[in-house]
Amino acid sequence: MRQLTSLDAQFLNVESPTTTGHVGSLIVLDPSTAPDGIWNIDAVRDVLEPRLHLAAPLRQRLVEVPLGLGRPYWVDDPHFDIEFHLRELALPGPGSLEQLGEQVARIHARQLDRSRPLWEAYVITGVADGRTAFYSKIHHAAIDGVSGSEILETIMDLTPEPREVVPELEPFVPRAMPSTVDLVRRGLASLAFNPVEVLRTVPKSLTYLDELPGAANVPGVRLLSEAAGVVGRTLGQEVPELDARDLRAPRTPLNGPITAHRRFAYGSVPLADVKRVRNHYGMTVNDVVMTLVAATLRRWLLDHDALPATPLVAAVPVSVRTENQKGELGNQVSVMVAALPTDVADPAARAEAMRASMLEAKRHFVAVPATLLQDLSHAIPTALSGLAARALFRLATLPGVPFNLFVSNVPGPPRPLYVAGARVEGIYPVSAVTDMTGGLNVTLFSYDGHLDFGFIACREMVPDVWHLVDYLADALDELLATIP
């Protein structure tokens, strides 16, 4: 029995009729490497079922504390049934990329059943060129990008022959569900502890409040942070002096109230080409990724006669997981913000501007506590956290757009992987969009010599999401053409 952290709970609280809190991935496979060339739901179940004990969230469900006296707990599901979570479907011919993306978008738009463990997986056949696919989704309350990739790897192997897994010492027998009395007792105890935790963490965190995405749009935030910094220095705290940044995200067609419908597109770029650009411009791989995204968005905005005169602003999730926290579940993540030079027409100049922007973003990010989001989440009373989170994620409650979109880069394995004997050809993340974070999310996963991009969008805001895949490839070609 494990209680959600205050940050984990926010991913539950943001859900609404138009917003989901889960993340997923689409794995495209070549089944010809599977034993006897057979790859179906039975083969996947035979690999997954003996490994369920390697990832606790797969057999745990939520239980709420009565009256909102505390955050929910993860408990063993007394009625766990893998048949409910592992499903199959077949695409109609010809099984194109677009058909697969549409099917994934439809499934991804549906919320998970909170009376069950918060995950689903689909074995998909009928994909063009003899391919198959495996789509899975799991709630963000249980995982972040790093722990999510670790869970995904429980079903993957380094060879077509599935590895031997040490079985459970004893057959899975769910522990008894906690009683209402026990949950109320725990809730009251957490209410008593929470003010102590708030007093321990929040006053120091207020110093960095103006570093949160969109803080520049809120009147008085910068003044509050400066005052907290003065108090902190007076008390002997080490508070770094940072130049104020005025990152204001412009309004674009990507920002506004979203609907419940999604579109999803995916594609890859060669890592070797990305590294050529990196080496030429003295950047990091992620700097190149951000440059490609800036060029892609610039072209899409030009298509829609909506290119702002000022740079877009991207929020970039950063793992703050320590060595001691490796293997732990839940969210150990923070966010930095960076200007995307969508206003720069020349590819070379855009790359230089992106490099400078990321250096500035990193300088501000490393100066703030890694636990900032977690600490400030403690400040929201448990009984009000749902209302607060949903209000925050509605643009109508904000004086301005905090940022235009999320761009996330999840590191992955550099070698080939297999699922039930089928070779993995690509791993494409399927993330989330909200009113606050924008109607488009770009997430990528590095795998076996390429970067696999997933573009998830509000269907009504970005109906032409597949254009972004083409523009991404063109953006890389543009950069390569600048290299002698």
Image (cartoon, rainbow, N blue to C red):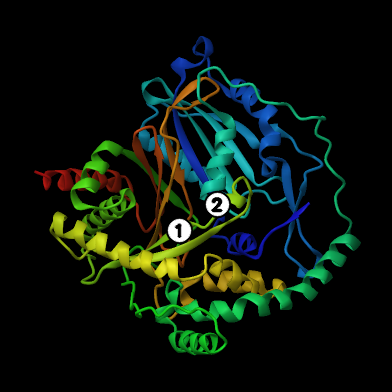
Instruction: Please tell me which of labels 1 and 2 falls first in the chain.
Output: 2
Q: Residue at x 49, y 12 (%)?
A: 37
Determine crowd level at label 1: few under 14, some 14-19, many 20+ residues with C-alpha closer than 10 A: some
Q: Name the residue type under label 2.
A: Asp
Q: Is residue 244 left or right of residue 389?
A: left
Q: Residue at x 62, y 55 (%)?
A: 141
Q: Residue at x 61, y 51 (%)?
A: 324
Q: Cβ–Cβ below 8 Å for labels 1 and 2?
A: yes
Q: Is residue 79 left or right of residue 272?
A: right
Q: Name, please, the residue furthest toward the front.
A: 236
Can residue 379 be seen in this snapshot?
A: no
Check disc 2 and report its element: helix, strand or loop: loop
* Residue 176 x, y percent position in the rendering: 87, 46
* Residue 173 x, y percent position in the rendering: 84, 36
Would you place residue 43 above or below residue 374 in this image?
A: above
What is the C-alpha distance between the residues marked 1 and 2? 10 Å
Check disc 1 and report its element: helix, strand or loop: strand
* Residue 152 x, y percent position in the rendering: 55, 37
* Residue of label 2: 144
* Residue of label 1: 317
Q: Name, please, the residue furthest toward the top.
A: 36
